[in-house]
Image (cartoon, rainbow, N blue to C red):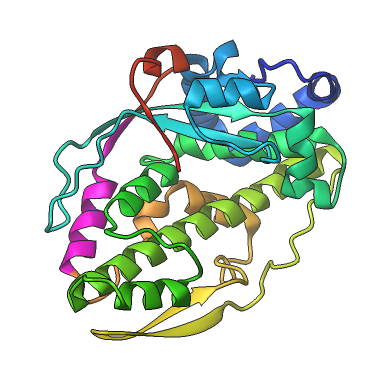
Amino acid sequence: MAITYLGGVERILTELETHHDTLDQRYRELLGDQKYTRLQEVQARVLTEESFCDNIKTVRKKTGEIIPDDAPSKLLLLTGAKFRVEPDGRIRDRKVKTSAVFYLSEQSFQHSSSSEFTDNPLVTFIHEYNHFVTYALQKVPIYVAMMYLSQARDLAPSGDINEYVQELLTSDLDPRKISQNIGLTQAVKVLDETQEKGNRILDKLILQSVGIDVPLPWRFQERQQIPVQLPTGLMVYGQGGDPYRSIRNDQDVLDKLLEWETYMAPPQGSQFMTNLLREIKRLKTSRVSFKQMRKKYKPKQ
């Protein structure tokens, strides 16, 4: 069986007792035998009772993250990686040990995006479990890539991209560094949107098997192109809409999401970004239980 839940939220347990076999069969159909078997192997190695947090105090204690009381349900990625990136974009240590922890509670359901269209906790659980599915099956998890890109920045954004540009322009960074930092931030944004919206499409594919509709109002909508004037030239980036707009078949979206590194290309004219993305795609990511990660890790920001 693919789906694993070892937490104590009664409503999730009740829903899974009713729908587990149907959902499990749907995962096998969508993933195919090879990926389905791989998923089983990863979760058997990674997921234990310690991987599931039913209240905010427990997840804070386990992960060390400062999580607000109104935090939504989430999958947190833990890693002991140092994120050392050389000035030319190369990475020193390509071995990355990771683990995953779920935060799922009655309180978190109320603040999750799924609560906008349903009060069924199964929808939120499947959404977070699908994040685990992609984490397990992607050669290099998108979450790991986002960590490296974020840590390579000299200055983290405090607002939207245009506010960030203004903040950088008033900093002591030289023009090349300013452009580099904006390129890194945009890459993080692209990967985050690729992951989250691809995950929602997977939610729809899975949950329709038990008669639950997941609305995707942004599906097939055109993305807005936003110009940003940089010291080194004009950059145009896309936001909103559907990053998978050109892919009409939802199954093909899943395939692309699981093989994101095959499709993502660095921005033109940046050797640093070219090197860094190439290095990220070469990372050797291991997935272990929380117990094995307990001594040393760095939570996802």
Q: Is residue 2 visible?
A: no
- 175 sits to left or right of 16: left
- 24 sits to left or right of 178: right
Residue 241 lies, in percent from the top left, at 62, 72
Residue 247 lies, in percent from the top left, at 57, 66
Locate the C terminus by quadrant. top left
Residue drawn at 54 percent across, 18 percent down: 47
Residue 56 lies, in percent from the top left, at 65, 27
Residue 198 sits above or below residue 53 on the image: below
- 225 sits to left or right of 108: left
- 239 sits to left or right of 174: right
Locate the N terminus by quadrant. top right
Residue 93 lies, in percent from the top left, at 17, 36
Q: Closer to the camera, 146 or 168?
A: 168
Residue drawn at 25 percent across, 68 percent down: 180
Q: Is residue 275 visible?
A: yes
- Let me know if residue 149 is in the magenta part: no
Occupied quadrant, residue 107: top right
Q: Closer to the camera, 105 or 44?
A: 105
Residue 122 sits above or below residue 165 on the image: above
User: Which residues lie in the magenta part?
Assistant: 271-285
Q: Closer to the camera, 243 or 161?
A: 161
Residue drawn at 68 percent across, 36 percent down: 69
